[in-house]
Amino acid sequence: MHFNTTIENVKLKLNCNGSEASEETEIAVNIGGVKHILYGDVLNRYPETRLAELVNRATGSTQDDLCALCDDYDDSKQEFYFDRDPEAFKCILELYCYGKIHMKRGICPMRFTREMDYWGIDAEYLDECCICSLNEVQTELAEIAEKVKTILDDLEDDATVTRGQRCQAFLWNLMEKPESSLAARVIAVVSFAFILLSSVVMCVGTIPELQVKDAKGNLVEHTTLESIDTACIIWFTVEYVLRLVSSSNKLRFVFSFMNIVDFLAIMPFYVVLILGAAQMELANVQQAVQALRILRIARIFKLARNSSGLQTLAVALKISLKELILMFTCMSVGIFLFSALGYTVEQSHPETMFTSIPQSFWWAITVMSTVGYGDIYPKTTLGRCNAAASVLCGIVAIALPVHLIINNFVIVYSKQRVLETTAKHEIELMALRAKEEEQECPEAAKMPSQASVDCSSVWDSTGATAQQSDRYIPYY
């Protein structure tokens, strides 16, 4: 196919050493409407590439042989035509001049790798920054493929699976995957309501006006609140046991962080129940019971199981570990410095509140975090100047890392939304392909299996069809 309009006629000698290239070995290539004049001595620096092979066959070969290396060939103009991306080809030409390739901003890394494969160039010639971008995209595609595999695994009906395994998988989806069915969504909503209810009961139960006295005159929770709390514990216990039974890897389930939180949320109730049944009256046992009841606050962390936002926040904090360490380091240095200065300058005042440097740590923490309770404050001029400096340093120490942490949260949240949306679109495209294949060949049409989903198939289905992925259609 010939291009009727030439956008740009670029004559590139690509001779980085400044020497004159031989006119006898030049070839004319038209890349998506942009004409380039290339020279053989430069292209032969990398003889394994398509351009080097093309320039070596330019003389003494038939038109059919030349067309095997390009999309079309004009014998009268002696010009080779390629339906490729002209912007990507400009990056390809950098290899022959500089020995490295750098992707321009805005070019898709995965599509550029296909361009490199077409021109016979290995990925090792990419710059390090471009390799990092390519690795990030490949990681995202791997996550999308894993998400699609998980969805397909739920949809597939394997005949080799036993009835017990099928029931186990159904129960696991019912308790762990709210998006799998309507019943799973209802259970997730009920579980969320029980978590909120138990948290409210735990807080309300500490109000003295709502407490009652036992036989010994001690204030205890109201019986109604205890009954509600018991009902919540029963639900949490049943939920934990069902998830444990339906889990395919019991050991991994038990030592998972969120499952440890679930265990800590229900364990104090049964420990207190056992100790109460044993009628232990020792003071240290009663203190242990009170300490165990404090662990009930772990129930609030159960909200993270049903909240994608809290899960995203946890991931963002995890990848922002360096920024958090930087913030705490700066705060620790500032607290030690300003508390020591505050104690030194306030020590001479007869009514000083800074009795020691460790006692001044509390003042430095409240001032640098801009809370300022006012229970401890300087009374000298130098002490007030020190307090003002600590406030400014605290604002800087907190504000700078917080911006990076927020940025990481936005990146993780956006990536998670894109991952979920792309996975759903992939499943929809698979269903459409299966429907089209069923109409064309009913006996050969089948739903794509889990093994057929990989990074390349996910990318091809979301970006373009397999037939169009290796061709560039000019849009001018």
Image (cartoon, rainbow, N blue to C red):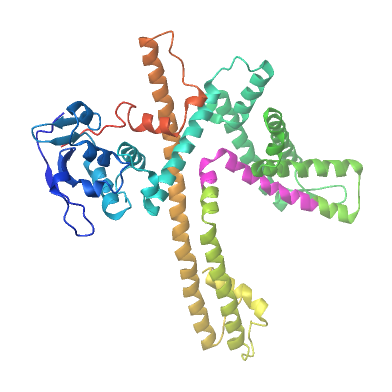
Residue 55 sits in which quadrant? top left
The residue located at (70%, 42%) in the rendering is 255
Asked if 179 appears above or below 406 in the picture, the reply is above
Q: How many marks?
A: 0
Residue 252 is left or right of residue 273, and the answer is left
Percent x, y of residue 108? 33, 42
Percent x, y of residue 464? 32, 30
In the rendered image, the quadrant that contains the C terminus is top left
Instruction: Judge whether residue 212 can be spotted in this image.
Output: yes
List the single residue furthest toward the front.
60
Percent x, y of residue 315? 53, 48
Q: Is residue 304 magenta?
A: yes
The residue located at (23%, 59%) in the rendering is 17
Residue 442 is left or right of residue 79, and the answer is right
- Provide the major secondary structure of the magenta segment: helix
The residue located at (16%, 56%) in the rendering is 20
What residue span does the magenta drawing correspond to? 290-312
Percent x, y of residue 326? 53, 65
In this rendered view, identify the residue nearer to me: 312 or 183. Answer: 312
